[in-house]
Image (cartoon, rainbow, N blue to C red):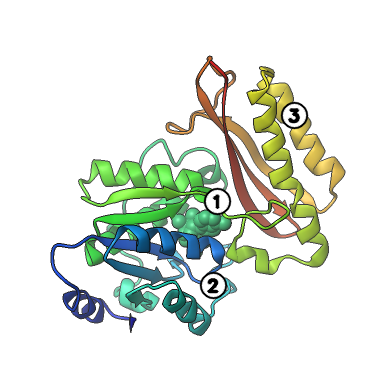
């Protein structure tokens, strides 16, 4: 496995790989866990060359967010990448990625970033799209792998790749969870024991909502209200940022589902000071 921290080093590393083969890119912010490992394995299964990027991207953090304290452990991350069979780990510094500080050119995908996480994190998805487009240019992969945990991010990146003619196929990968259902996240490291226990209610409530719709419950707004109450009243450590039901592709709010139509329950919930996101897909029976 080659480890490099500059664009020049990355280009040199890519030149050592056989031509004309499938190249898979797995963009991450590091502090890797089994969710990231599943993306690397999916890339390994589909591509001859697997590149993992590890970069805590300052552009996608708001001024009051956790950029400085975001967990980092490059040595452990490299060991995980090696174990999972990555060929190249690219771990640039912020100075390497953004030579003149904040770039004057950024990438904005309209509409899809307005709701859900976009509402409470203005500018976040522009930061994501800007760094992902830089990584797509630097690596020029045939495939790029993203987790469905960040569902909105996945749809936005798909749209960006279509709109800007990136040749990479954007591959969505299923959410990896703890035994009690909590979605793995680098930010879970912030949780106290009590917050960690309370956070298990998030996937429980989301999967309950999805099951209710599958079983024919059509009262979406009542379901959402009850679920919000369940989360907050049942757990003093939890505070709902949003809990929404949306079209899985357009991300527009849905108040009902036609027979055979799919919908996505998506939530961001604070456990103490830590903001966690999760989602559950469902389909109304035909
Ligand atoms: P991050 O390092 O949090 O920016 O995540 C890097 C990639 O890993 C993103 O595409 C995430 O959606 C994905 N990812 C993070 N957590 C999980 C998880 N629990 N299951 C599947 N994919 C995940």
Q: Position of residue 242 (x, y in %)?
A: 64, 40
Choose mark 3 or mark 2, whichever is in front: 2
Instruction: Name the residue rendered at 54%, 28% in the picture.
Output: 263
Q: Is residue 74 left or right of residue 46?
A: right
Sequence-wise first label, 3 or 1: 1
Residue 242 visible in this rendered orientation of the protein? yes
Q: Is residue 259 left or right of residue 197?
A: left
Against 149, is 89 above or below? below
- Categorize mark 3 by other alpha carbons within 10 Å: few (<14), some (14-19), many (20+): few
Mark 3 to mark 1: distance in Å?
Answer: 25 Å
Choose mark 3 or mark 1, whichever is in front: 1
Tag 2 secondary structure: loop
Establish whether ligand 1 lies closer than 8 Å to the Cβ of label 2: yes
Establish whether ligand 1 lies closer than 8 Å to the Cβ of label 3: no
- For residue 175, which numbered disc appears in the image? 1
Tag 3 secondary structure: helix
Q: Position of residue 13 (x, y in %)?
A: 23, 79
Establish whether ligand 1 lies closer than 8 Å to the Cβ of label 1: yes
Choose mark 1 or mark 2, whichever is in front: 1
Instruction: Name the residue rendered at 69%, 68% in the picture.
Output: 190
Determine the residue located farthest toward the left in the rendered image: 19
- For residue 225, which numbered disc appears in the image? 3
- List the residue tagged with mark 2: 31
Against 135, is 265 above or below? above
Against 76, is 140 above or below? above
Sequence-wise first label, 1 or 2: 2
Tag 1 secondary structure: loop
Q: Position of residue 213 (x, y in %)?
A: 65, 24
Instruction: Name the residue rendered at 42%, 38% in the picture.
Output: 112
Q: Position of residue 95 (x, y in %)?
A: 35, 78
Q: Is residue 203 left or right of residue 54?
A: right
């Amino acid at each position: 496995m080659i480890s490099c921290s500059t664009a020049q080093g990355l280009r040199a590393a890519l030149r050592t790989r056989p031509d004309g083969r499938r190249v898979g890119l797995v963009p991450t912010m590091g502090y890797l866990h089994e969710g990231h490992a599943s993306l690397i394995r999916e890339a390994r299964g589909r591509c001859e060359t697997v590149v993992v990027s590890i970069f805590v991207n300052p552009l996608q953090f708001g001024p009051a967010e956790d950029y400085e304290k975001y967990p980092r452990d490059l040595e452990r991350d490299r060991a995980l990448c090696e174990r999972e069979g990555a060929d190249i780990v690219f771990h640039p510094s912020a100075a390497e990625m953004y030579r003149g500080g904040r770039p004057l050119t950024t990438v904005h995908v309209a509409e899809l970033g307005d709701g859900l996480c976009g509402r409470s994190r203005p500018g976040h998805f522009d930061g994501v799209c800007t760094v992902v487009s830089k990584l797509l240019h630097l690596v020029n992969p045939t495939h790029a792998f993203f987790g469905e945990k960040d569902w909105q991010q996945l749809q936005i990146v798909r749209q960006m790749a279509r709109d800007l003619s990136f040749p990479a196929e954007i591959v969505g990968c299923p959410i990896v969870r703890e035994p009690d259902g909590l979605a793995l996240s680098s930010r879970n490291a912030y949780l106290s024991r009590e917050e960690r226990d309370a956070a298990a209610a998030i996937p429980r409530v989301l999967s309950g909502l999805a099951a209710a719709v599958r079983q024919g419950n059509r009262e979406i707004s009542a379901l959402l209200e009850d679920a919000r109450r369940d989360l907050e009243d049942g757990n003093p450590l939890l505070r709902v940022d949003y809990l929404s039901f949306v079209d899985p592709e357009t991300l527009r709010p849905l108040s009902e589902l036609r027979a055979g139509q799919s919908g996505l329950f998506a939530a961001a919930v604070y456990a103490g000071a830590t903001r966690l996101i999760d989602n559950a897909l469902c389909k109304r029976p035909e």
